[in-house]
Amino acid sequence: VINAGKSQHNEDQACCEVVFVERRTSPRGRLPSREGGGELDGGRKGFYFHYWALFDGHAGSGAAVMASKRLHLHICEQLRDLVDILQDPSPPPICLLHDARASPVELSRMPLAEDNGEVPNDAVPRFHLEKAVSHESLVIGAIENAFKHMDDQIERERASQRLSGGCCALAAVYLMGKFYVANAGDSRAIIIRNGEIIPMSREFTPETERQRLQFLAFLRPELLGKEFTHLEFPRRIQPKELGKKMLYRDQNMNGWAYKKIEEDDLKFPLIYGEGKKARVMATIGVTRGLGDHDLKVFSSNIHIKPFLSCFPEVRVYDLTQYEHCPDDVLVLGTDGLWDVTNDKEVASVVMEVLTSYEPNDPCRYTMVAQELVVRSRGVLKEQGWRLANDKLGSGDDISVFVIPL
Amino acid sequence: VINAGKSQHNEDQACCEVVFVERRTSPRGRLPSREGGGELDGGRKGFYFHYWALFDGHAGSGAAVMASKRLHLHICEQLRDLVDILQDPSPPPICLLHDARASPVELSRMPLAEDNGEVPNDAVPRFHLEKAVSHESLVIGAIENAFKHMDDQIERERASQRLSGGCCALAAVYLMGKFYVANAGDSRAIIIRNGEIIPMSREFTPETERQRLQFLAFLRPELLGKEFTHLEFPRRIQPKELGKKMLYRDQNMNGWAYKKIEEDDLKFPLIYGEGKKARVMATIGVTRGLGDHDLKVFSSNIHIKPFLSCFPEVRVYDLTQYEHCPDDVLVLGTDGLWDVTNDKEVASVVMEVLTSYEPNDPCRYTMVAQELVVRSRGVLKEQGWRLANDKLGSGDDISVFVIPL
């Protein structure tokens, strides 16, 4: 991590941990035995996951600091109910026993008192439309809900803990042979494998999420507080242009068309600006992340939070499907990196630095991360921080993880 | 087109046309002259587009028949205002003159009476945040809005014309060197170029649009009429399972998680079933298309239409970017084709049939289409219609266009 100098505390925060997920025990200390499962040996039952995450704070470091200390614990908590299920190769049970705090046991394997007289294979014709759910999708669901619980915790504790602002969150979870990369915001993850770039995330910005936001504003116009319109226009409209025809697009359109300008169109557009300058209600440039519960449009009482989502998109990479070499890596970076460089440039720095170290040198990945950060920062010249190509360096905090696959 | 025999009139309908888009003249017959443009020669000013479309009707052929006769006229109508703009290589004007029915003239090029004293280059600093809009995105917007106008016309005339049901719509527009492929429903378009498959559409079904539909139902629960829940479950829940934990997902989730079953969860899920059997409110298996204004949940007063979108997704293929050979084609097909075959199989039939005809034989593309239809239908055997691999043939109407690039 490098601090851009715009704040005393880093707005970028990071975390990497090995986390043990302990199987949740029944509240009465009695563990239901399970067909096909072994007896407990008295030791802790569970599994480990490896975890790396970047949090890019805005309007303060509070949310980013808290998320960096807690998100992995929320992921662990969500996974605790799944310990037995994920370790069992048979498909996950659709329905669990009543007792929510007991270890989950598949309904069809456990005769129920009220089911007297029913034979197990009744289930087949009765539930012939049953959808198969994979183990992988349970892990995805666990990570998604962990982000939600993290966001709820920030909401609850923001007053007592004086947590300011919000943060983008990018987390990589390695579990049972697979990488789960969860992204909420504008950080980015890529895998570089044998020189090939595999995107592991996409950015959530006012431009990429325009239609979702316009759809919400269309259905809930009261969220716009009479100050904004859900339509997009290529520029501000002047009052004297009333009645003229101007390009617009709504929640249903990807293309543009002309419409006659009406009074309501003179309001400020919900989504406005292009690229890094695009904003939701002229306020925020990312549309997913944690925190921001108190964020309002400047000098108004209009809340931004309803338009932001705390849910990540989770992509899965199966490590067992490919034989990896020491130069294959997963790179996580905040926008401080990606604003001034692209996937290809990052891949070439990765390959350049890795080849200058021995394949078994444990420092080589750290050196790549350091090089990526330093190059994006640039060098202080008379005209400010400059990159090697003399373009402006990143003025933002920069964080990078380089994780060998 | 082949009729499956399930209805007297084809539920699949098709259309192909060359359409002239005539520049809209001013209502007073006076055409404003335009800087850089030539004088009119008295002839009709405009351009042509080529058009192919497939309409897959359901619950009757009415909507499909009407759309096949009219959609291209709506596209033409939307393009009429754009004749000058699309032929002018400079970027489209953001704002047009007041008179909506006059030929569009760029604001900055046409001095306005009320703008006396303003110099044109004022526009630059004032609108420095102006977004660039491409010609291509105007055509996309025109096609999107043409689908909407087509749907509105079906709504208006459905009673007087006795238009029953609804239809999926897949349309390919060739205009100024580019193919615009617009899809609303579960038909599919692919380009086969030098043996390579380039997808030109994606399908809109309860499964692919689950999150949009759940989001709408979450925000507008009254649309569910107390009969449905916006949550998805892998199977129906039985009343006796109340209080147990079952897998679910909501509008924010791609993965699955367990939740305790409450009273409200016993309602039927908004999206239910898998693959071809997935339905919105147990009623319809496609989520985009034209018509269906009267469609209700069986023996209820719950309307389905609010959950359906008439807007297509438009993909663009630039023909000038590549040197095409006589075997490069665009294939459009309804689900009658794609239910029993896949992109690869279609590509291999295309190549197989094309190589058996001379490259300059004009029949060869028709023969490919015929072969694709006939193979998907299969042969009538004792156990019904069977494909060459003895699998069940398509029981649906089948339509195919094979268009040389």
Image (cartoon, coloured by chain):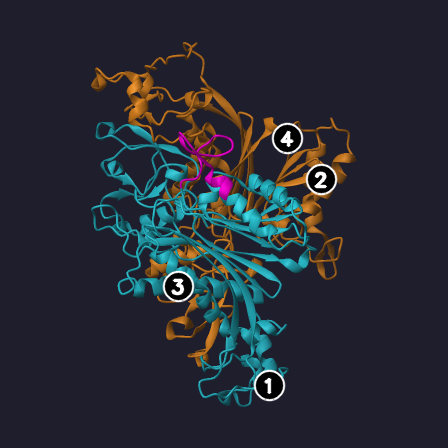
Chain colours: A cyan, B orange
Residue at image point 28% right, 52% down: A295
* Horizontal and vertical percent position of residue A190: 56, 48
Mark 3 to mark 4: distance in Å? 53 Å
* B313 relative to B342 in the view: left or right: left
Q: What residue type is labelled 4?
A: Leu
Whether A53 is drawn above or below A99: the answer is above
Give the distance between the C-alpha atoms of the residues marked 2 and 1, in whole angstroms: 63 Å
The answer, for residue B4, to whether it is visible in the render is no
Q: Which numbered disc, 2 or 1, marks the residue closer to the eye? A: 1
Q: Is residue B369 left or right of residue A112?
A: right
The residue where tag 1 is placed is A41
**Does the magenta-highlighted stretch encompass residue A388?**
yes
Q: Give the range drawn in magenta.
A: A374-395
Q: Where is residue B41 in the image (x, y as percent from the top left)?
A: 43, 9
Of the residues under marks 1 and 3, which one precedes in the sequence? 1
- Does the segment drawn in magenta span residue A49? no
- Point out residue A386 in the picture as x, y percentages from the top left corner: 45, 33
Do marks 4 and 1 share a chain? no
